Image (cartoon, helix red, strand yellow):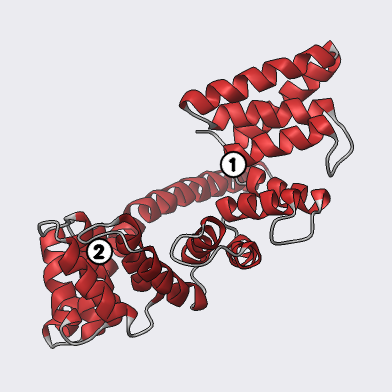
Amino acid sequence: MRKIAGLYQEARAFMAKATWLCAMLLTLVFPWCRWAQAQESIQVLQRRAEKGSPEAQTALGTKYQNGEGVRQDLGEAGRWFRQAAVQGNAEAENDLGFLYDYGGGVPIDHQEAARWYRKSAEQGYAEAALNLGWLYDSGQGFPVDHAEAARWYRKAAEEGNADAAFDLGVMYEKAQGVAQDYGEAARWYRKAADKGMHIAQLSLGRMCASGRGVPRNQSEAVRWFRKAADLGLASAQYELSLAYSSGLGVPPDPVAAYEWMELAVFRAHGSIRDKYSAARDALTAHMTSEQLDEAKRRAGEWKAKWPH
């Protein structure tokens, strides 16, 4: 029995060493295998691109743009994007426009950027329509033209682009390039908000709170403020704190009011941070030490999940 027990212990020791060796081999070999596969895929992509595939040329350009599997080289990215773009690939046209817009591998040239964005947008590529709208909105390369910006935002928004939907909402709210229409502003804000865009959620919440474009509904306003606040938007956290402090849309809750104002301070910067800090400090006048401790504890838990 002792001999059998000894053999058993030796077998266990051998298996432990074997397991360790296997783990070490996997640690060393797997990354190499992944690298080798990546290199092989780049080579395949390169061959397809050299044969004239616009899809492969665009994909290879993106690899060079982001440094994925190759050394980052914006000039090389632009070369491949151009080859695909002259074949009418909408994604490549947009990507080439982006390089001209921000000076990646080519000199900044907003008019050239607009030319490629327009080609892409006219094929229904939403991101290009958004980018073209931004050029007209900001006056990059030509005079500001809010009407033209709104036209391109609309094209992108109708394709489901959340950024464009929000920008179009802003234009309706502020009467830029379109007649002021709070109902339309709220409609486009909602489309962006439903896609998880926190600034749109805040804007829609404010419209619900004021009754502009939608029936006044403080509870609905708080619901949107909370969605944006949960995503870390300081101005939404501020609005949510005010709701809990005043009891608008929710029962008054000094602990929640302090918690959210502390989080607004945590996420804000500059003079806005100073404003939120003053508002937070003013809340302590109506709180017990126990309430203050609880509010700080809750805020601390949130901060641990959402560090700067």
Is residue 62 something that shows in the picture? Answer: yes
Q: Residue at x 59, y 43 (%)?
A: 9
When asked about the image quadrant of residue 282, the answer is top right
Question: Residue 237 placed where, x, y %?
Answer: 66, 37
When asked about the image quadrant of residue 31, the answer is bottom left
Q: Amino acid at mark 1?
A: Gly
* Residue labelled with disc 2: 98
Q: Are marks 1 and 2 in contact (CB under 8 Å)?
A: no
Task: Give the side of residue 286 with respect to residue 81, left or right.
Answer: right
Q: Nearer the viewer, residue 101 or 143?
A: 143
Q: Residues within 10 Å of mark 2 (few under 14, many from 20)?
A: many
Q: Residue at x 39, y 73 (%)?
A: 152
Task: Give the side of residue 247 with respect to residue 140, left or right.
Answer: right
Is residue 298 something that shows in the picture? Answer: no
As helix, strand or loop, the secondary structure at mark 1 comes to loop
* Residue labelled with disc 1: 232
- Disc 1 from disc 2: Cα separation: 28 Å
Q: Residues within 10 Å of mark 1 (few under 14, many from 20)?
A: many
Question: Residue 136 placed where, x, y %?
Answer: 31, 63
Question: Residue 137 placed where, x, y %?
Answer: 35, 59
Q: Residue at x 12, y 58 (%)?
A: 105
Q: Amino acid at mark 2?
A: Phe
Q: Earlier in the sequence, mark 1 or mark 2?
A: 2
Task: Give the side of residue 285 with respect to residue 194, left or right.
Answer: right
Q: Residue at x 39, y 48 (%)?
A: 24
As helix, strand or loop, the secondary structure at mark 2 comes to helix
Question: Residue 5 placed where, x, y %?
Answer: 65, 44
In the orientation shown, which residue stands out farthest toward the right?
251
Q: Nearer the viewer, residue 238 or 60?
A: 238
